[in-house]
Amino acid sequence: MKKILLALGTVSALAVTQAQAETAITDTDGNGTYSYEELKAAFPDLTEETFKAADTNGDGQLDADELKAAQEAGNIPT
């Protein structure tokens, strides 16, 4: 029974790690902001409309503050 519980715990931990990895946002060009394409890779359901609404300064990129605000508003997943 202990072996089954240990195995289930291990599988659960791996599933959580995988889910977190799927939502990792990567700044692929290293410019310190996130493009629509970079966020779309992390959040496949993200629309251009949602991205543009979050881009409050209109520069075509989300900085950390814009991303945080969009996530706090529930427009982009955390």
Image (cartoon, rainbow, N blue to C red):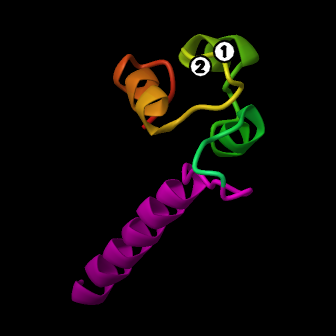
Q: Any mark on residue 55, and which?
A: 2
The residue at the point 47 percent across, 27 percent down is 66
Q: Pointer 1: residues within 10 angstroms few (<14), some, or many (20+)?
A: some
Is 60 on the left or on the right of 34, as rendered? right
What's the magenta region? Answer: 1-30
Q: Which of 24 and 9 is in front in this view?
A: 24
Residue occupied by mark 1: 52
The residue at the point 55 percent across, 54 percent down is 24
Is 45 on the left or on the right of 53, as rendered? right
Relative image position of residue 52 (x, y in whole percent): 66, 15
**With respect to residue 10, does 35 lie above or below?**
above
Membership of 14 in magenta stretch: yes
**With respect to residue 47, does 28 lie above or below?**
below
Relative image position of residue 56 (x, y in whole percent): 54, 14
Q: Which residue lies furthest to the left in this view?
A: 2
**Quarter that holds the N terminus:** bottom left
Q: Any mark on residue 29, and which?
A: none
Q: Which amino acid is tagged 1?
A: Lys
The residue at the point 71 percent across, 25 percent down is 60
Q: Which amino acid is tagged 2?
A: Asp
Snapshot quadrant of residue 2 = bottom left
Q: Pointer 2: residues within 10 angstroms few (<14), some, or many (20+)?
A: many
Is 14 on the left or on the right of 62, as rendered? left
Relative image position of residue 74 (x, y in whole percent): 41, 19
**With respect to residue 77, does 75 lie above or below?**
above
* Cα distance in 3D space between marks 1 and 2: 5 Å
Q: Is the magenta stretch mostly helix, strand or loop?
A: helix
